[in-house]
Image (cartoon, coloured by chain):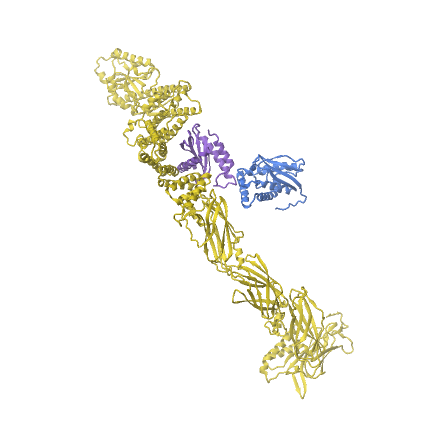
Amino acid sequence: MAVCVAVIAKENYPLYIRSIPTENELKFHYMVHTSLDVVDEKISAMGKALVDQRELYLGLLYPTEDYKVYPSHQLCRYGYVTNSKVKFVMVVDSSNTALRDNEIRSMFRKLHNSYTDVMCNPFYNPGDRIHSRAFDSMVTSMMIQVC
Amino acid sequence: MAAPAEPLPPVIYTMENKPIVTCAGDQNLFTSIYPTLSQQLPREPMEWRRSYGRAPKMIHLESNFVQFKEELLPKEGNKALLTFPFLHIYWTECCDTEVYKATVKDDLTKWQNVLKAHSSVDWLIVVVENDAKKKNKTNILPRTSIVDKIRNDFCNKQSDRCVVLSDPLKDSSRTQESWNAFLTKLRTSLLMSFTKNLGKFEDDMRTLREKRTEPGWSFCDYFMVQEELAFVFEMLQQFEDALVQYDELDALFSQYVVNFGAGDGANWLTFFCQPVKSWNGLILRKPIDMEKRELIQRQEATLLDLRSYLFSRQCTLLLFLQRPWEVAQRALELLHNCVQELKLLEVSVPPGALDCWVFLSCLEVLQRIEGCCDRAQIDSNIAHTVGLWSYATEKLKSLGYLCGLVSEKGPNSEDLNRIVDLLAGLGAERPETANTAQSPYKKLKEALSSVEAFEKHYLELSHAAIEMHTSIGRTRSARLVGKDLAEFYMRKKSPQKAEIYLQGALKNYLAEGWALPITHTRKQLAECQKHLGQTENYLQTSSLLASDHHLTEEERKHFCQEILSFASRQTDSPGHKIVLPLHCFAQLRDLHFTPSNAVVHVGGVLSVEITMCSQMPIPVYVEQIAINVHFSIEKNNYRKTAEWLTKHKTSNGIINFPVETSPFPASQNNLPALELYEMFERSPSDNSLNTTGIICKNVHMLLRRQESSASLETPSGVALEDGAHVLKCSGVTLEPGANRITFRTQAKEPGTYTLRQLRASVGPVWFVLPHLSPRVQYDVYSQEPQLHVEPLADSLLAGIPQKVKFTVTTGHYTVKNGDSLQLSNAEAMLILCHAENRAVIYSNTREKASDVSLRVQSSDKVTSISLPAAPAYHMIEFELEVLSLPSAPVTGGDSSTLGVTEPHRKHKDTQKAGYCMATTDHKVSIDCPWSIYSTVIALTFSVPFRTTHSLLSAGTRKYIQVCVQNLSELDFQLSDGNLVDTGSSGDLQLVPLNTKTPQHIYSKQSVFFVWELKWTREPPPSLRCQFSVGFSPASEGRLSIPLKPYTYEFQVENFFTLYSVRAEILPPSGTEHCRTGSLCSLEVSITRLSDLLEVDKDEALTESDDYFSTKLMYEVVDNSSNWAVCGKSSGVISMPVAAQATHRVHMEVMPLFAGYLPLPDVRLFKYLPHHSAHSSQLDADSWIENDSLSVDKHVDEQLDSGSIKSRGSVHSASSSEHKGLPMPRLQALPPGQVFNSSTGMQILVIPSKDDHVLEVSVT
Amino acid sequence: MSRQANRGTESKKMSSELFTLTYGALVTQLCKDYENDEDVNKQLDKMGYNIGVRLIEDFLARSNVGRCHDFRETADVIAKVAFKMYLGITPSITNWSPAGDEFSLILENNPLVDFVELPDNHSSLIYSNLLCGVLRGALEMVQMAVEARFVQDTLKGDGVTEIRMRFIRRIEDNLPAGEE
């Protein structure tokens, strides 16, 4: 399942990024950051379409084979962008559980909802880093299943 | 035999495969037809309706016609579809029954039997008819056609199995028709055969797949079977379907691997787990890689072999389908996939082997794609290929690191061994690539051959990758590759090459605010800069790192230490400074002044306390912290008074500074908000608006934001300002976290001081905060010494001691001992010096400094107040009592306030309605020690009293009444009122009729004093008097000093009575009471009381042989209109100037009311005849007199409403005089000279009898 | 949560998110304006009071409940009618004091605090204190001086939100103390 979940602001700085195991955090940061390239590409490419059929899910960004982070795991980065141009990027370990697209979709939807709640918290100022317990626990629940 | 018949075409798997059709019967016939046939068959497409509900397809059929042989027919089932004869055709052109019976029939039967034996039902019999043949036949039998016979004999119930083809080689419409009919038949039966056989094949295949759980099952066998199907589709050009077959195989295999990873391994899979021995990437040049295929067939393929083969097939098909980009994409997935499958299956792989394999594969795929696309296509599809490029780069890199090709001293022996092994694993280069120069194989071999070669290839790849990434706008990925490259360069000890990449990456991360990458890249950059010896940059980066909380404590300490050690070491070039931005070293939190209003006088001490948050992990000793101050002379150059100073700054002088959020990108909430302020310049004099506008106080912040990301690394060109004014604080140790630092400074020049730069110097390293924002400034002012003198009460009262407050604002002047104020006393105002005067000294901010006694000594002219010693910018306050003499001498300019005598004075008084107090100003000139000029101050005292006097007569006795009115708010004690005759007349005495005891006079109240005048000899015509009364405030008891009495001078004239007038009303004779409406007689007697006096000497006096007489005019006026005067009410009489001379006048009056009526009023006037002699000059004063007269007249007018006649006459007189005619004049006698004895007398009037109405007037 | 033109029993629907966010905005603004949470709590209570003294009219007008005879009845009306009408929830009434002058309203889900997470620097903030004010103000208008306070709050990690109501005394003079 998800090994890294990131929420990225419209201006492309991370609002939230969490990964397991934590010792490879840096690696994931790089990974997520580079995947923004493809996110941008996809947005600009099918931007029109996205708006039209309200499709926020960007699908597979690209697979990565990485010994260092995860021996013998294929990591796939998936992207999702809200209409407010906030991006979600998930690095998913799809090595031994071939995740169906719609599972990923639903994960993103969960993420999006949770993010919306964060935004609705009157004490949260939009644009700040996210320090929400609720959001955290939700993310944990998505990452928990990692082997 | 004909050429196409034999030899049997060998089954080679090429694209040239066609479905096989066997031909039996007349070979020559077939040969003759073959060309036409083979060319006609594919011409028309045919719809293929397929089983399993697959979409029908149009197919152009071709087929491979071979001679019928029994061995062609498959024995049992049909594994090999490619060699399977889908249709059997029997050719004959026999048209002769005999011949048919003789040979053809048997031949056919044999053929049929063979087919039956192999249960092959796909057959066709073609009968070719030729007219020519018929011709030369002589014996014509009844025409029963061979065709019918054959149909009867063979095709029972399926007559269409026998087709007629007539005159195939002719060119006629008939020929055409028969051809078409034939071909259609041929095609349909072919397709039917396909459907049937393929369907059967697929069924078998499925059943085989179902068995896959059974022990004996082998993937490879199954692979071969399904691939057969794929081949057929390929043969039929159904590439999609073919691809599907391979994808299914792919998926099946992957699934097995995954399951294996999950635990349940199929035993056949273990075979794939054999260690990897060869890793010569993918081969995509041949449509079918036979070697690998055979390996699979022989069940000897390794996982890589299988994958490679599978992919090569998929690749081929995809390329047929014009989908090269899918190839690229699939390739990438495949490679990742393989790598992890090997891991899953725990296949032992020699280190680097996979890297080689992936590397080769990537390049192979790329080259294959390039091979089949043109440049333009490729360039427009980089997005698909770039992944492979960077993957290859990555792999080559790790190979390089693995084999020690990246160290500057080249690979060691074991590295070399490893290289050799890896190369061995590649095996020999494949023939198909052998002669291509840039084949992946060659590249890799070369790259591994030497350090230089490796570098060359690695750089080539990296740059290619970066270029591609950037070209499609994948800057971030490009940066990442760049960073790898940088690492490589660092390894190669060529940091100068690395720097640019690191900078680039860092810039990107900073711009997007990715903290961790920033930190990491910075660390690398720091190392790089260190190697490059870019001291400043290195130090700056270190400072940034030292303050970076994403690093461990140790790392931070390390970098901090780096700075410190440099600072301590750097001695060689003194004066050389290294300027770094402060914010990464420490952050300025707040600042506050004491005094808190940040205003200090020249020479005063100002202290500035700042809070700095040290970002360093350890305490840092700072030689000096300095604040650069910009001095500007006060623009509005009016002297700042203390009040102005206090109100012009915020009370609590704490200024907070926004916390620098350095590493974050310029997103809306990180940008500092515009600090706009409205600005009003008011003119100092009248605080009217001069200019107004809006100031943005943090422009520099906003502007700096733009290039912040860049300037963060390279030392921002911090312009050091020349320090004319600098606040310093030396030898501070900044603990981690908040530190308070205090600067003290003595204010010098007056003006505004703006704090500009904050600087902390650690050895030669200067950390500088280029701008303080919000702007901070303090003011220094200088003040001239000043003296203020003001009364404590709102108004000073004359005559009694009054307190006056002296305030000395020392300003820049320091009062020394012995300095004194010299007051030159004004006469009539004296300064009362008590034994004990105290002065209080305040600082400018009104804190009480001290309380000292004050020495005041006064001589007659000068009072000198010796000031206590006081420092500059203090205030000395003390109070003095002053006393203004209550009344100044008449001569005094202000004496007019007193002395009623002057007529104009009188006027003034009447004008001032609510008698406000008369005032006197006293000017005192004071010599101050600080100036050569003397200050003149004016004190205004108001006289608390207003006094009037009046002369009263009783017959010849005279009295003087003085009325003292207290106008002040105070109550007074009046004592020993006294009146003296200041005139010469000796024997005149004033007898007081007043109490001796002091009297209380309350505020706004009056007190009267009366004296009787007594004289023996003839009194002087006029009398000068001075009234004086002692007074003291009632409130206080005994006063320290004796107070001067209040005096009032005035003058009385003609107080001596000349005439006494008596009026008497007698009732009509015979009645003892007057009655209303009845005439009574009024008798007026005027008596001269004295002989000729000085006062009589005027032109009214007429002398005839020492008999003097004067003309008087009397007038009877009844103001109360009680009386009607009948007859003439006035007349002129000539009065002898002699004592007791009396003149009587009778006249008739009638009372109008009953009751006690006051007598009518009798007035006397001097009657001055006209003297033509000096009329001219007389005219002048005649005006005056007349004036005065008419004044009197007018006064009467108000009162009098009765005696119209008399007034009329007078008026005529006056008016006539206006015409300039000489007329006699009237002059009122001064009040003292006439005593009317009957004033106040009343007479009883009773109402007349016949009155029905009783009117009573009560007066 | 419901407001309508004509005082009828039917009520216009309105987005509860908007409602919640509006309240959130209010509270956070107060947090900006006042230094410490206690002041904010006070302000919320005041506002609530001022709402309550008005709302009661609306309430009585629309819910035709007669006068309550005892505190228990009042409690029921508050929970079952008032809360339902204005917040769309029906809190349960529990732990009555033996004297019957105190009870607790248990709110399983408090619509005011959807999405809300209290930051650590506002630990002593009573986010929904407005409600207490409303109850206090409304009851005061019907001559009941009560004390309402939060004793449990989901925001503070408690399982439920509990408002403790205490009856103080009957107010004899019908005039309210006047808006604070």
Q: Is residue B1120 visible?
A: no
| Chain (yellow) | B
Q: According to the rendering, which colour does chain C have?
A: blue
Q: Position of residue C46 (x, y in %)?
A: 60, 44
Question: In the rendered view of the protein, which quadrant contains the N terminus of chain B?
Answer: top left
Q: Position of residue B849 (x, y in %)?
A: 57, 57
Image height of B1190 relative to B163, above or below: below
Q: According to the rendering, which colour does chain A have?
A: purple
Image height of B273 relative to C99, above or below: above
Q: Can residue C100 be seen in this view?
A: yes
Q: Position of residue B34 (x, y in %)?
A: 26, 21
Q: How many marks?
A: 0
Give whichever of B678, B824 is nearer the camera: B824
Q: In this view, does A19 lie to the left or right of B321?
A: right
Q: In this view, does B470 lie to the left or right of B1010?
A: left
Q: In this view, does C43 lie to the left or right of B578?
A: right
Image height of B772 relative to B18, above or below: below
Image height of B858 relative to B1057, above or below: above
Q: Where is residue C156 in the image (x, y as percent from the top left)?
A: 56, 37
Give whichever of B88, C176 is nearer the camera: C176
Residue lying at the far bottom of the rendered structure = B1105
Give whichever of B819, B231 is nearer the camera: B819
Give whichever of C96, B1032 is nearer the camera: B1032
Q: Is residue B603 left or right of residue B1150?
A: left
Find residue B921 and report its image quarter: bottom right
Question: In the rendered view of the protein, which quadrant contains the C terminus of chain B?
Answer: bottom right
